[in-house]
Image: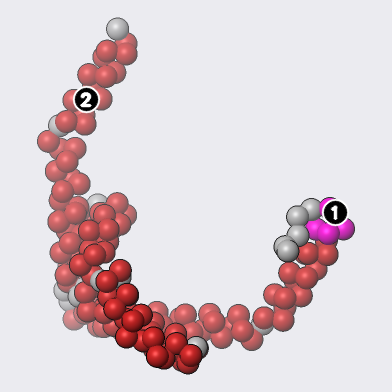
Amino acid sequence: MLKSVVACVMTAVLLSPGAFAADDGAKKAAAKLLDVMNMEVMMENSIEQMMTIQLQQNPNLAPFRDVMMRYFKKQMSYDTLKGEFVNIYADAFTEKELNEIIAFYQTETGQKAIQKMPELMSKGAQLGATRVQANIQELQQMIKAEAERLKTEGGPTPQ
């Protein structure tokens, strides 16, 4: 009897119009946010930026630039990822929160934040890479010490 009541309640909750409306509302708001953020252009710019960095780090890839760009545009294009981005944002924020974010991004300051975001992210990534590179010997020493400790204790060590 209790199982039947629980099953009925669960079915009623899952099939109620409100159960899907909020999700649809959040997804619509997430799609609007992506448009306001100009996500398609941001992604295209990110792919170009990523390719430039890859070619700077490995000039031997230069002859394959066109092939790699075709691949990234196919696999990482806005059109192929938009639905997944919508789900990510709709899962992370409520419809109300998404609308508040949209309102901010529609302001002059919000538009500036959108415009500056790729540059700031790139500078942050560059800072992180520079910091790791500057201190790589410390990491190597720590790994070596841990490998020795694991070896002494009979634990797993990398091959």
Q: Quadrant of the N terminus?
A: top left
Q: Quadrant of the C terminus?
A: bottom right
Q: Which mark is residue 136?
A: none
Q: Secondary structure at mark 1?
A: helix
Q: Is residue 94 magenta?
A: no
Q: Residues within 10 Å of mark 1 (few under 14, many from 20)?
A: few
The magenta stretch is 150-154
| Residue 36 x %, y % | 17, 71
Where residue 109 appears, x then y in whole percent?
A: 23, 80
Q: Seen in the image, is 152 located left or right of residue 121?
A: right
Query: Where does label 1 land, which residue?
Result: 153
The residue drawn where x is 40% and y is 90% is 63
Q: Is 151 within the magenta?
A: yes
The residue sitting at the left extreme is: 17
Magenta stretch secondary structure, dominant = helix
Residue visible at 78% across and 70% down in the picture: 144
| Residue drawn at point x = 17 percent, y = 58 percent | 29
Quickly name the residue at label 2.
11
In the depicted structure, whether residue 37 falls above or below residue 120: above
Find the residue positioned furthest to the top. Answer: 1
Identify the element where label 2 is drawn: helix
Image quadrant where residue 157 sits: bottom right
